[in-house]
Image (spheres, rainbow, N blue to C red):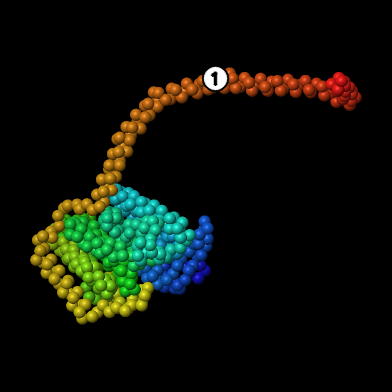
């Protein structure tokens, strides 16, 4: 690996000095490492790096190709933007966790074998969980534990799949899984690997960890979390399961599922979290379709999504930072004192809504076009409906009630300058990709034969968006946020965890106490009596026999010692006497 600098090591090793730095030196350092990582990715050449053997298996630390480079590029860019957004933080722990989180995500992207992938995969889970715990407070701590519980479970499932896959194939190298195109050719281990991957992709019903934990994370932590975990899952699915039919329908369901739940949400970051589920659905569906255009669409949409979703979370985080409120029914009227935040947020809202000249328009449409080219009319219809719902809630409802709506006379101001700069960086990229998509298209795994800016496509998109805006105006009265909580499939593990604790603390504890009482009153006295009897038998019987034998041996040895005079004539005389006696016995016996 002499000609290859692994960006994961830059972040993970680079996290070590952070607690010992302070002030301007720390800020400069926090920006230096992501900048070096971006340069390292730009300088990469396709190939395999870090081959080795471990436990009889071939290990490949880094495999570089166009698919890994496109994800690594956006990950490092997002790391720089996220660090700019977090520069005002004095908490070194959050910076360390963010570095390890980003480094682990990059480790997954370049992993050439399942063992390397798994180690970085688990690193992501623990580092990101800290960004939830760092918020402190009961809700954040409980959400953090639930987040860890789900991801540790997913990690165990993934590890079981890796072991089973390795035993079945004899190799731990990470690549397309044979039989994934038909599903029927996949083994048990392959399905377990798929389950571990789709859990991190937040595919329903395995999605509730995302919408449960992200709103409880720190303001800056949620920005990082929105960018990495689900997108690394998209990457590994694109690497291992392209063309898997099941993913087409799971992705389509995701796209609609997230939009429907967003209707019910009052928490601004929870609403945005549901739209992560929806947007990742487009990527999963594209991977499932598996054509070159579809995989290109999934990869490009992941690239654009990381930037505009981070921008949306940064805008919502800025509001929470200055007002201390995150529920839509408690916000409104702050557009007057936060005009820059409003403008930058709306760039992200237009990008996620696939407005022309914004990034989502040139990436999301590629997935929809690929579904149409594959003659999947139902998928096209569902994804188009989801796009309309995204604009309705993220582009209209959320900014209206968060920034405008009822004037609640909140004391608000623009957030710190570094937060605005980070939002500006993401906004510029959202517009640049929308206006000049070719540089992004050049990064994609396959040659791009797609033109987003056709007259029909632009008019269809604008018509859909304007019709959605008209519906919003007409039915605004029905969209007023209510102070309610919508439970997702997390209801099962919330209630299940409580039931488990009740079972452990009451019936099982009482059973254990009853067994302990029986042991103390019946079993223990019997055991003690048996032990005393055994001791007496040992002392009076076994020890007496052993001591007697030992005494006899010592007495006989003493007598023999007295017979040993050391005079040679005595020994000769004894031998003569013995010989005469033996001869006499022989003669008598012979007669």
Q: Position of residue 180 (x, y in %)?
A: 37, 64
The residue sitting at 52% across, 69% down in the picture is 2
Q: Position of residue 386 (x, y in %)?
A: 21, 66
Residue, far top: 540
Residue, far front: 591
506 vs 9, nearest the viewer: 506
Q: Is residue 41 left or right of residue 279?
A: right
Residue 130 at least partly seen: no
Q: Position of residue 108 (x, y in %)?
A: 41, 62
Q: Mark 1, residues whose alpha carbon is within 10 Å: few (<14), some, or many (≥20)?
A: few
Q: Is residue 220 left or right of residue 159?
A: left
526 vs 454, nearest the viewer: 526
Residue, far bottom: 455
Q: State the residue position of label 1.
A: 536
Q: Secondary structure at mark 1?
A: helix
The residue sitting at 13% across, 66% down in the picture is 472
485 vs 234, nearest the viewer: 234
Q: Is residue 199 left or right of residue 61?
A: left
Numbered disc total: 1
The residue sitting at 36% across, 51% down in the picture is 153
Q: Is residue 256 above or below residue 514?
A: below
Where on the picture, by quarter, is residue 429? bottom left
From the image, which quarter does the C terminus lie in? Answer: top right
Q: Is residue 539 left or right of residue 206?
A: right
The residue sitting at 24% across, 62% down in the picture is 253
Q: Position of residue 151 (x, y in %)?
A: 35, 53
Where on the picture, by quarter, is residue 43? bottom left
Residue 549 at least partly seen: yes
146 vs 512, nearest the viewer: 512
């Amino acid at each position: 690996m002499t000609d290859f600098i692994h960006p994961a090591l830059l972040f993970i090793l680079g996290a070590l000095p952070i607690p010992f730095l302070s002030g301007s030196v720390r800020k400069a350092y926090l920006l230096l490492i992501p900048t070096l990582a971006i340069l390292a990715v730009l300088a990469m050449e396709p190939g395999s790096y870090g081959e080795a053997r471990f436990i009889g298996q071939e290990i490949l630390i880094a495999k570089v190709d166009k698919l890994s480079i496109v994800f690594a590029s956006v990950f490092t860019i997002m790391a720089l933007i996220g660090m700019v957004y977090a520069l005002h933080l004095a908490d070194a722990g959050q910076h360390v966790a963010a570095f390890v989180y980003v480094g682990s995500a990059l480790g997954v992207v370049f992993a050439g074998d399942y063992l390397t992938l798994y180690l970085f995969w688990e690193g992501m889970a623990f580092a990101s969980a800290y960004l939830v715990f760092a918020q402190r407070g009961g809700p954040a701590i409980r959400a953090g534990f639930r987040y860890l519980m789900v991801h540790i479970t997913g990690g165990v499932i993934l590890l079981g799949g890796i072991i089973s896959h390795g035993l079945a194939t004899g190799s731990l190298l990470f690549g397309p899984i044979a039989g994934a195109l038909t599903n029927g050719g996949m083994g048990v281990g392959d399905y377990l690997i798929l389950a571990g991957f789709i859990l991190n992709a937040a595919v329903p019903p395995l999605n509730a960890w995302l919408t449960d934990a992200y709103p409880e994370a720190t303001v800056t932590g949620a920005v990082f979390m929105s960018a990495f975990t689900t997108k690394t899952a998209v990457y590994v699915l694109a690497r291992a399961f392209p063309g898997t039919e099941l993913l087409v329908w799971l992705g389509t369901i995701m796209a609609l599922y997230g939009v429907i739940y967003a209707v019910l949400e009052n928490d601004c970051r929870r609403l945005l979290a549901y739209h992560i589920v929806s947007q990742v659905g487009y990527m999963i569906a594209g991977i499932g379709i598996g054509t070159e255009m579809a995989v290109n669409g999934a990869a490009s949409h992941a690239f654009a999504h990381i930037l505009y979703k981070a921008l949306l979370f940064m805008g919502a985080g800025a509001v929470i930072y200055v007002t201390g409120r995150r529920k839509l029914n408690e916000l409104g009227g702050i557009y007057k004192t936060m005009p820059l935040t409003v403008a930058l947020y709306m760039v992200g809202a237009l990008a996620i809504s696939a407005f022309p000249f914004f990034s989502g328009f040139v990436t999301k449409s590629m997935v929809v076009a690929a579904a149409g080219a594959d003659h999947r009319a139902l998928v096209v219809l569902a994804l188009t409906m989801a796009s309309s719902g995204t604009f309705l809630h993220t582009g209209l409802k959320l900014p209206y009630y968060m920034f405008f709506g009822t004037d609640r006379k909140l004391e608000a101001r623009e957030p710190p300058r570094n937060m605005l700069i980070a939002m500006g960086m993401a906004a510029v990229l959202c517009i640049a990709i929308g206006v000049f998509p070719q540089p992004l298209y050049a990064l994609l795994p396959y040659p791009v034969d797609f033109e987003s800016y056709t007259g029909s496509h632009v008019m269809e998109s604008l018509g859909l968006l304007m019709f959605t805006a008209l519906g919003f105006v007409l039915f605004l009265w029905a969209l007023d946020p209510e102070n309610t909580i919508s439970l997702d499939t997390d209801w099962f593990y919330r209630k299940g965890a409580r039931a488990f604790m009740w079972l452990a603390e009451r019936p099982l504890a009482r059973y254990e106490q009853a067994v302990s009482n029986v042991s103390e009153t019946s079993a223990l006295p019997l055991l003690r009596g048996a032990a005393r009897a055994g001791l007496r038998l040992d002392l009076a019987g076994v020890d007496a026999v052993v001591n007697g034998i030992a005494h006899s041996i010592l007495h006989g040895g003493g007598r023999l010692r007295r017979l040993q005079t050391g005079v040679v004539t005595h020994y000769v005389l004894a031998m003569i006497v013995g010989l005469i006696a033996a001869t006499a016995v022989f003669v008598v016996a012979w007669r």
